[in-house]
Amino acid sequence: MEDGDWDALTSELMRQNCAFVASCSVILWDYLITFGQEVQYVWHCPSRMTRYHFLFCRYWTFGYSIAYMISGTQWTPQIPIPRKDCRTWFLIHVASVGLLYTGSQLTLIERVFNLYGKSVVLATGLFALQCIQVTGMLVLSYHISASVHFNPICNAVDIPNLTFSALAMATCVQCIMWALILRKGWRLQTGSFPKWRRYLRTSEAHAKISWGVAFAALTLNTSHSFARQRVAPVYIFTFPMTVLSIGTCRYILRIEKAKYTRAIVTDDVDEDKEDKAKGKQRVIAGQFPATRHSYSPRQPAVIPSLPCPGAPPTQNFSSESMRHSHGAVASNFPYLHDAQSYTCDRTSAAITNNSPRGSSDCSSRQTSSLRTSRSWYYGAESNTTPNSSIADSPDRETQTADTHGASDIEIGSMHSSSSIDSEDLRRFYNDTWSVGPFMTGGS
């Protein structure tokens, strides 16, 4: 081989080494900035499957990069590299990409499973399709590695066209999964850049971006390799693995962080509900006083009425049964005592057939009751208006004398004694029924 060819191969190897270092640096940088979240959300994750899935996607790529750096063909000082070593590492590259690709595809299958109502049939079909794709890729790579040629820096040359079938199958599987996801979960939002900026911070956006970048890198590098008929491991295998590892791990971290935050919020809401329920119980219990009032409510004053001696027992019983209501009203209106006495007199007069003795007895009782009620009324009036009571004392004496002399007057009767003139009778009614000057026309 000429010196120009060796210089070209050496410079190409240096570029590939720089690309490999950049890929490893990106993996290490992502590992350092997300290690705290990994410990918090993944190591203590209740789902064992999620924990194993994350650890595999994270540390499989990390271990692959370290192993390839230490014992691979990338940093070997021996040029040309033996063909056996090149073939061995070519198969290692294909197997590593296939396993990581399957682990990353599990996140998409789980996404489809959740979007379509936890359809087991659909998830099983997609997983079977993914397994068929990876198995076919491994078998095809093994057969191709036996006939492919390698240059001195271990890049495959003279790639057969059969290798393109593996890329076509991977593209079909990706299109099927993303079509199912976008059919349910994608909402196109045009003309809203702030919404897009918020969307780019979500776990779904990270997964889509990582898968898009990985798919674009795999497609471009494969096409470039077919065009130049040379397969460089760092471009075909290392870059796609780095992007897939970072995107898948970020997606899992976002999902677990959302679950953790939701669980904390739910616990806080439950605690708030319990505190509110306890506080409500304390408020309800505090509404009742510790000790009750010992006094009883005030009863209305009741003035019992005495039955007439001449009334029959049934009449007395009727008067006794009505004494509560009538007595309560009479306590507020004193002149009703006179009406009650008058009712008693009329009843006794009807029973005794207008007997002179009975009439005189009832008249005397009426007079005494009237005197008592008038004295009680004027006594109450004297407590409130003492000057008026003193000024009207001669009139009360005259009216009392007239009442004693007019024992044969029947209130409401068509006949009355001629010993009392109309002026005295009107004064009697005015005083008895508490008629003021404003009701008598100002007289």
Image (cartoon, rainbow, N blue to C red):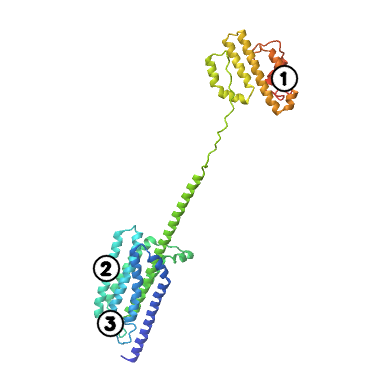
Q: Is residue 177 visible?
A: no
The label shown at residue 132 is 2
Between discs 3 and 2, the one toward the N terminus:
3
The amino acid beneath tag 3 is Asp
Give the secondary structure at mark 2.
Answer: helix
The amino acid beneath tag 1 is Arg
Judge by depth and name the residue closer to the eye, 413 or 91: 413
371, above or below 387, in the image: above
Between discs 1 and 2, the one toward the N terminus:
2
Could you say where residue 338 lies in the image, as x and y percent from the top left? 63, 19
Instruction: Locate the N terminus and report the quarter of the image it occupies.
Output: bottom left
Q: Residue at x 48, y 65 (%)?
A: 193
Q: Is residue 429 left or right of residue 217?
A: right
Judge by depth and name the residue closer to the eye, 204 or 34: 34
The amino acid beneath tag 2 is Ile
70, above or below 336, in the image: below
Spatial CA span between label 3 and label 2: 28 Å
The residue to which callout 3 is attached is 85
